[in-house]
Image (cartoon, grey):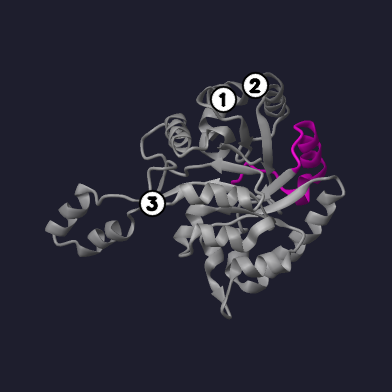
């Protein structure tokens, strides 16, 4: 059965201030019992606290995050430089999945660079498989650009057949596709799904002030920038269909994430998402 959990990226400040164990204790009080670790420094102290959360809180470590190669400014370790440590951490935390959270910035420059990334990732997936660990790729919207009529995500999936997928339904929607259809399309390749809503916000007062002042470009910037991340159930995505289809294709973890909370705290947002998912009938997945 799939389990609904949390993507820790949105909690990185909480982790830094309160520590992993205390943060995950608060998360467990809301009702979540699985976490995907991302943008959290994997120091010995943090790994120990994550292990303590497993044993004392029953918190499953759904997946760890790593870049393929070192990324400037990213707290995530790289599989190229830190392979043995990442494998050791995964085994320590009883996690059998590693996810690459983003296409490397330099790979976005050309299809040739994307293919190089795919080939290197496929080789890394083979190395990880020798340790019983799967490698997965998380999409954004850029993977739905077309090259000779094919979506980039299709090219990645075909070129790196040993690498599974983590489908983010918000970014699928932002890329112009239907999340339910996309989940069915990739089927058993998908081990994890990011539950993140897609909301159209209201135009701020500043936009109309700019319009009144004759600053039409500023108004149009606000007009085209109303797409927001949202708590699950507070936007326009059909989670009553997305969650069952995710179960149907065999996804193991459905991870709530919200890149921007617009003034609310991450824990408040997670509580709203939890309560809305329970109201939709998915309490048994927590």
Left/right placement of residue 56 relative to residue 167 reads: right
Quarter of the rendering containing residue 7: top right
Range drawn in magenta: 73-96
- Looking at the image, which is closer to me, 250 or 267? 250
Is residue 72 in view?
no
Q: Which residue matches tag 1?
A: 28
Q: Residue at x 71, y 64 (%)?
A: 118
Q: Give residue 57's mark.
A: 2
Q: Give residue 236's mark.
A: 3
Residues at circles 1 and 2 in contact by the CB criterion of under 8 Å: yes
Q: Determine crowd level at label 1: few under 14, some 14-19, many 20+ residues with C-alpha closer than 10 A.
A: some
**Mark 3 vs mark 2: which is more N-terminal?**
2
Left/right placement of residue 95 relative to residue 283 reads: right
Q: Determine crowd level at label 3: few under 14, some 14-19, many 20+ residues with C-alpha closer than 10 A.
A: some
Give the secondary structure at mark 3. loop
**Mark 1 vs mark 3: which is more N-terminal?**
1
Give the secondary structure at mark 2. helix
Is residue 5 in view?
yes
**Mark 1 vs mark 2: which is more N-terminal?**
1
Residue 269, image x and y in percent?
A: 43, 34
Q: Nearer the viewer, mark 1 or mark 3?
A: 3
Q: How many marks?
A: 3
């Amino acid at each position: 059965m799939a389990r609904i959990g949390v993507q820790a990226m949105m909690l990185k400040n909480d982790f830094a201030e309160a520590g992993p164990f205390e943060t995950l204790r608060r998360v467990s009080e809301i009702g979540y019992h699985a976490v995907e670790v991302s943008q959290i420094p994997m120091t010995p102290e943090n790994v120990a606290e994550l292990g303590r959360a497993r044993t004392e809180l029953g918190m499953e470590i759904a997946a760890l995050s790593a870049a393929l190669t070192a990324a400037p400014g990213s707290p995530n370790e790289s599989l190229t430089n830190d392979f043995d440590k990442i494998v050791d951490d995964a085994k320590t935390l009883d996690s059998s999945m590693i996810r690459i959270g983003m296409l490397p910035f330099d790979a976005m420059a050309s299809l040739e660079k994307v293919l190089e990334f795919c080939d290197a990732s496929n080789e890394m997936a083979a190395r990880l498989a020798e340790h019983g660990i799967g490698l997965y790729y998380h999409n954004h919207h850029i993977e739905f650009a077309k090259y000779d009529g094919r979506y980039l995500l299709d090219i990645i999936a075909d070129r790196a057949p040993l690498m599974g997928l983590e489908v983010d339904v918000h970014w699928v929607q932002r890329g112009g596709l239907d999340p339910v259809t996309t989940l069915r399309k990739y089927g058993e390749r998908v081990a994890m799904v990011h539950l993140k809503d897609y909301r159209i916000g209201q135009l701020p007062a500043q936009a109309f002030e700019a319009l009144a002042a004759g600053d039409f470009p500023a108004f149009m910037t606000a007009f085209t920038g109303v797409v927001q991340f949202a708590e699950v159930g507070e936007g326009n995505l059909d989670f009553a269909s997305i969650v069952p289809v995710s179960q149907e294709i065999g996804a193991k973890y459905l991870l709530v994430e919200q890149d921007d909370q617009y003034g609310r705290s991450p824990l408040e947002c997670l509580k709203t998402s939890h309560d809305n998912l329970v109201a939709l009938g998915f309490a048994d997945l927590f």
